Amino acid sequence: MAKSETSGITANLHTLLERMRHATFTQGARVIALTAPHANAGNSLIAALFARRLHETGLKVLLVDASLPPDPRTSPGRWSPGDGGGLHLVSREAEGPDRLWIAIHPDDAGRFNDPARLRSLFETELSAYDAVIVDCAPARIGSGAAIEAMTIAAISGATLVIGKANRTFGHERDAALALLAECRAPLAGFVINDIIAPSLGSEIAREVRRFRRLRPRWADRLAAWAESLPLFNLPA
């Protein structure tokens, strides 16, 4: 990738993260939930980048991974939200935000889907953090996660929904937003992941350029055509 292209992506990403910050943390939200209409929308990566960006502003930030499925290898009853056990599982990082992976036994899913217990976890046990960024499972019924995204979103201060450019369809977006609205989640915005997720035209161009050694002119022309054709570069 050319240096100018890298600089452009970095600038665009910084702008995106700043918009997310202004729509959530600067509006008074401390617990910020990020979810998506489906898997592989880049939700975890955006959550990690967002947490790091907040950390860079001087805040004490915790990134929580609540997108994990139930794990029968985990000891049942190891801890419950609100009992103080979660704080001991936080991984303190020398650089960047601290991390907490919520891995629970299937038998404990009921306690972790209790809004009152989750609120106690975020607001009492983890009260030392200025901001808590929660990477949630997809906001759809039957996501397979141990904790439903709607449960976390409902007790958050703000919820962001991440859609992937040219991969998230309108009906998927609308279904996720409807579920979140039903649980009265404080929706702060719908973020289109078009920086890290390339358009269809960009993906075609990337594959075509692999043949430059054999047919350089043909590869360059076809790649340029794929990147310029509106049909391949529509917004989500």
Image (cartoon, rainbow, N blue to C red):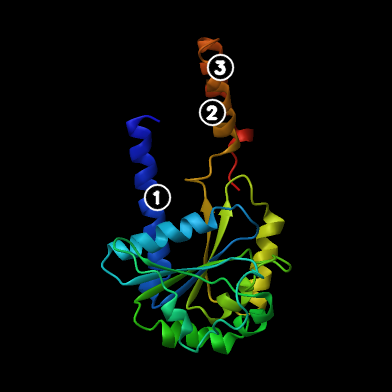
Q: At 40% from the left edge and 71% from the top edge, which residue is drawn?
A: 62
Under tag 3, what secondary structure?
helix
Disc 1: CA contacts within 10 A as few (<14), some (14-19) or many (>=20): some
Name the residue beneath numbered marker 2: 206
Name the residue beneath numbered marker 3: 211
Q: How far apart are marks 1 and 3 (CA)?
A: 30 Å
Depth check, front residue: 31 or 66: 66
Can residue 228 be seen in the rendering of this structure? Answer: no
Under tag 1, what secondary structure?
helix
Instruction: Say if 184 sits above or below 17 in the image.
Output: below
Disc 2: CA contacts within 10 A as few (<14), some (14-19) or many (>=20): some
Q: What residue type is labelled 1?
A: Leu
Q: Residue 132 carries which label?
A: none
Q: Indicate the position of residue 18 as horizontal and vertical percent values.
A: 36, 59
Q: How far apart are marks 2 and 3 (CA)?
A: 10 Å
Depth check, front residue: 117 or 156: 117
Q: In which quarter of the image is the N terminus?
A: top left
Q: Which amino acid does label 2 sit on?
A: Arg
Q: At 46% from the left edge and 82% from the top edge, which residue is drawn?
A: 122
Can residue 152 be seen in the rendering of this structure? Answer: yes
Choose mark 1 or mark 2, whichever is in front.
Answer: 2
Q: Residue 13 carries which label?
A: 1
Q: Which amino acid does label 3 sit on?
A: Phe
Instruction: Say if 221 sits above or below 121 in the image.
Output: above
Disc 3: CA contacts within 10 A as few (<14), some (14-19) or many (>=20): some
Left/right of residue 176 with respect to residue 96 in the rendered view: right
Label 1 with label 2: CB-CB less than 8 Å? no
Q: Indicate the position of residue 75 as horizontal and vertical percent values.
A: 60, 77
Pick whichever of labels 2 and 3 is earlier in the sequence: 2
Left/right of residue 192 with respect to residue 18 in the rendered view: right
